[in-house]
Image: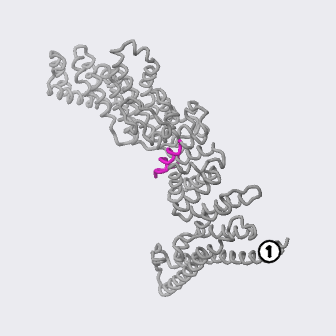
Amino acid sequence: MALEQLSDVVQRCQALPDDSYSPEDHDVFTIAGRSCIEEGHGPQVLSIVLDEKNQNVVRSMGWNLLPPLVQVLLRKDDKHLPQCLAIFNHLLETCRPKELLIGLLELLEHDDADRIAESLHLLLNPLQKVLLRLGDRKASSLGMTLSSVLDQLAKLPVSDTKEQEEDDVFSLGRCCADLARFVRPFAQEARLNQSSGNQLRKSHKTAGGQEEGAEDELRTELLKFCMKTLSQPLLDIQIWDPDTLPLSPLRTFAAEILDILGTVGESLPGLVFHPLLKKKEVPGFLEEEVRYPKNSLACLAHLVFVHHLAADTFPSVFSPVFCLRCNMEHISILLSRTETSRLQKGLELYEKSLVRVEDGSLPADLLEIRTFLTVPQNLVKVMTICPKHDLRTKGLKVFQLSIDKFNTEAKYRFFQYMLRTSNHSGVEGYIIKNIKNQIDAALQPGNGNIWFEGVHLLPLLRKVFSLPDGPETDLLHYLDRVMESLNLLRYLVIRDKVTENQTGIWTELYKIEDTFLKPLRVGVNMSRAHYERELQDTREKKKKNAKEESVLSVSVGGEKLPKMTSESQIQALHSALHTFDMIESVLVRIEELVEVKDGLETAGEPQLLRA
């Protein structure tokens, strides 16, 4: 029935002028033709399509047969697969390219990852053939196609392990390789246009002006494609080094994207250093922020500095400090996100940018640049709230590396800033430990510096030796900070002599006693009394409910602790009391050291004066 309807409508349209077919003719051709293919009449449809007398009809309406043909080609097991493939190829050569393009792009749209991968693998080559038939008018159609393909590619899962990429579990590697092959002839055309030079265009002023506009549009679409690809998928995937994974389609794809950027006339150093270099206004269809998206440039910097892709295009004249300054903008963008892949890339880029810088060489002036303050703030978030342990550990390593690169004044000002802004006891404790190390280095013979001795050091010590809320400070919450502060004070009392007072600690000690030690003793006593009372109450509740397994909810400091068994609650309270004992023992030791040392130095003072 369907075959007869198809034959009738084709025969009737043979006698009609081209493009004068009625909507009814289109409907009958579409419904009957699709039914024939679905019902297995591929050989008969092929005969009709190839008939010379039917070519005008096929040119106008043949693209409507694409959906069932693609279904057969995707199944691969249809007995009429060769005939359907022949029909498909003939339509690609005969039908109007604009209509073919619309039909093929509609067939790319899927939500299932397997369907997406198979459709891309099948249809990218036909799409390439159709676009090449458009000649100089293809730029906007190419842009639409590339955008649709990348939208589909973004739906594919990303490999988490080297083994997954080796096996190409989600077909992302194959799809990226297919996409690279698809875009290659258009990139080659852009390269030829770029190298043709201004002289040839000047010799054809009228036609040349139109041609130049088409060339600019093609370069613009390829640039948009590269930038979008850098944002996704390249920013989300992990690229393995050649030593780890010798054959990596994803690494090859990334290298091709960078090559295309050079093809369309973009300087890779200019793109990476874009935040610092004033770029001249580029003629084209894109505004600056759209032309060079910040996420894309951050991914580009990561590919260049971490994976050394296209590294040969970078002149060696750029100093490590200049590269660091440029990359700080990219690092800030990456570390401000929460996605694991972005954080990983941000940490890797920061580390690679820092290792080339000489220790102790970064001046304090850099701290006036916004990113040199926002990046540490983002690092603190990675170190403290990132759910992945390896990223927290990596964050701490890079944080210390960044400190090591500052000179003494920069370290001093950086420590001041972090103590003022970090709002995290663990980070503050880590900063205080670094302060202790810097003081120790300054007190070594021949290593003195003005920032970690004497009058400059005192304002920093005052920030260290303070309690956020005085005696009512939550000592368990601020334990890291409190213990490192006490350790620093103990070190200073032991290391610095009363008669020399290089750090100024002995003239400042009475203030420290008032603002830090006394409130801390009061806080320890208050906290111990509170927790002892809670321990007693918990034990009594346990006795009352000894016959049944009870779950208690205990409030400490006005906040309810997580529900737990009475035994677990008792253990937690004992641990807290042990912490207060530990703080008190260090306090007592500091008092003893001060008394002993002050007494010894005072006793020796007359001899020193007489000498």
Residue at x-position 56% and y-position 46%? 350
Q: Pick whichever, 209 or 14, lies toward us.
A: 209
* Figure quadrant of residue 451: bottom right
Q: Left or right: 122 with respect to 549?
A: left
Instruction: Provide the residue designation for mark 1.
Output: 605
Whether residue 609 is situated above or below residue 101 in the rendered picture: below
- Could you tell me residue 210's position as x and y percent? 33, 19
Is residue 294 located in the magenta-colored stretch of the structure?
Answer: no
Circle 1: residue type: Glu
For the N terminus, the image quarter is top left
Q: Which quadrant would the C terminus be assigned to in this image?
A: bottom right
- Stretch of the chain drawn in magenta: 326-345
Is residue 480 at least partly visible in the picture? no
Residue 536, percent across and down? 53, 85
User: Against 175, is 135 above or below?
Assistant: above
What's the magenta bit mostly, secondary-structure-wise? helix
Residue reaching furthest to the front? 610
Corner quadrant of residue 592: bottom right
* Residue 331 covered by magenta stretch: yes
* Secondary structure state at the residue bearing disc 1: helix
Residue density around tag 1, few if under 14, some if 14–19, many if 20 or more, within 10 Å? some
- Please say if 148 is above or below 90: below
- Asked whether residue 245 is in view, the answer is yes
